Image (cartoon, grey):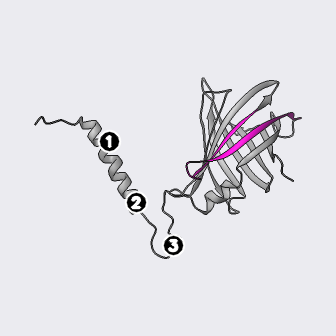
Amino acid sequence: MKTRHCNPMYCLLVCLIVTGSAMGQSRSEPAGHSGMQPDAPGAVHKQLSRLAGEYTTSIKFRMQPGAAPVESAGTARISLGLGGRFLVEENSGTLFGQPYSGMRLYGYNNGTKQYEAMWVYTESTAILNLTGASQDDGKTVTYTGAFAYPGGGKENLRVVVRQVDNNHFAVELYGNADGGGAGPVLETLYTRKGGQ
């Protein structure tokens, strides 16, 4: 009988997948806790899931706080992904007369106890990564991150996602240049389609 030899990298990958699956099935929290596994969605994810739906968006952009806003409108579709672990947003609209579209991914990392988000849109090839925290059980989440410009330079960002009621939430983005000066402000109000 002919012996078949396994490619070492393939064998290692299979071992990691099998071992990881077995470890994932055996993990649980100590007695007296909710029993939620670290990789399973929990109460925070349920709170996030309330944002799922179809929305119209009203956008105000200011080059700096207090400046006259440039206003525009758009739409957004927010769905649950990967068994309720993440919110997936697809949005589109116009800004400065130019059409744009974007995607946003929101979640909560049970391991680090942090909210996490990732934004991309058609005006850039960069991925904006954000981490955040909440002081009011997820009704308001404040994220921080940084956007690097081509050729150098960086914009430090603060993003506040605030649930207004069951049919409205707001996303406010505040920028600060490397030197610490106030930068652009982008405010988006989401209104659920068909909501009261």
Q: Which residues are magenta?
A: 68-92
Q: In the picture, which quadrant includes the N terminus?
A: top left
Of the two numbered discs 2 and 1 on the same chain, state the one appearing first in sequence.
1
Q: Is residue 178 visible?
A: no
Question: Magenta part mainly helix, strand or loop?
Answer: strand
Residue 120 vertical placement versus 159 (above, below): above
Q: Which residue is mark 3?
A: 33
Which amino acid lies under the numbered mark 3 shown in the image of this protein? His
181 lies left or right of 18: right
Judged from the image, the secondary structure of the residue bearing numbered disc 2 is: helix
| Cα distance in 3D space between marks 3 and 1 | 33 Å
Q: Is residue 91 magenta?
A: yes
Judge the density around disc 1: few (<14), some (14-19), many (≥20) Cα neighbours within 10 Å.
few
Q: Is residue 185 magenta?
A: no
Q: Which residue is mark 1?
A: 13
Which amino acid lies under the numbered mark 1 shown in the image of this protein? Leu
State the image quarter where residue 153 is shown: top right
Of the two numbered discs 3 and 1 on the same chain, state the one appearing first in sequence.
1
Residue 81 vertical placement versus 29 (above, below): above
- Image disc number at residue 25: 2
26 lies left or right of 40: left
